[in-house]
Amino acid sequence: MAKVEEEDSVSLFDRQLLKEVDLRKGECKLHNCGLAVNNPGDNLVLRPLCSDDYEKERFHAMRSCAGTYYLIVLEDTKLEKIVASGTLIVEQKFIHEAAVVIVETLILLSERLGCYKTSLECKDPLLTFYTQFGLKREDNQNYLCKRFFH
């Protein structure tokens, strides 16, 4: 596995949190496939976003994915400070069961962080897939959606 940590790089959050995620506690039993947070698959490293990802061509990589990433900021010009931001990602499909590793890890991480719930939005045909992670429909739990038909 390639080393991704560099001494001057700053993680978005403490990478120790991911080390504490135990996939054996997850619903999908990914450990039975030999997968773990520290071993998510061949040539893969699961880690927080780091400050040097932009120096590693992350910005240019995002920009080269035309029609995928739309990041906007609201700047207070008096304070010369970003006061809000939003991101729209036109998500590409996961490949090679990457979704299983990502979803399972995020669910376990949310539990570790003491979140009172984890929610996921999906279309009806995917409900069966996501129930394998212990997610379920609950009464009086709603989300809002605006669909565009082009």
Image (cartoon, rainbow, N blue to C red):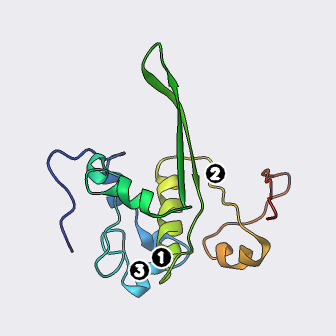
Q: Is residue 48 above or below residue 101?
A: above
Q: Which residue is mark 2?
A: 117
Residue 20 visible? The answer is: no
Question: Quick check: 6 left or right of 136?
Answer: left
Work out which quarter of the rendered image holds the N terminus and state it: bottom left
Q: Earlier in the sequence, mark 3 or mark 2?
A: 3
Q: Residue at the far top: name it.
A: 78
Q: Earlier in the sequence, mark 1 or mark 2?
A: 1
Question: Quick check: 134 left or right of 52?
Answer: right
Q: Residue at the far bottom: name it.
A: 33
**Of the residues shown, which amino acid type is indicated by label 2?**
Lys
Q: Which residue is mark 1?
A: 98
Numbered tag placed on residue 31 in the rendering: 3
**Of the residues shown, which amino acid type is indicated by label 1?**
Ala
User: Separation of disc 3 and disc 1 at Cα?
Assistant: 14 Å
Q: Is residue 93 above or below residue 18?
A: below
Image coordinates for residue 80, horizontal then vertical, percent: 42, 19
User: Separation of disc 1 and disc 2 at Cα?
Assistant: 23 Å
Residue 6 visible? The answer is: yes
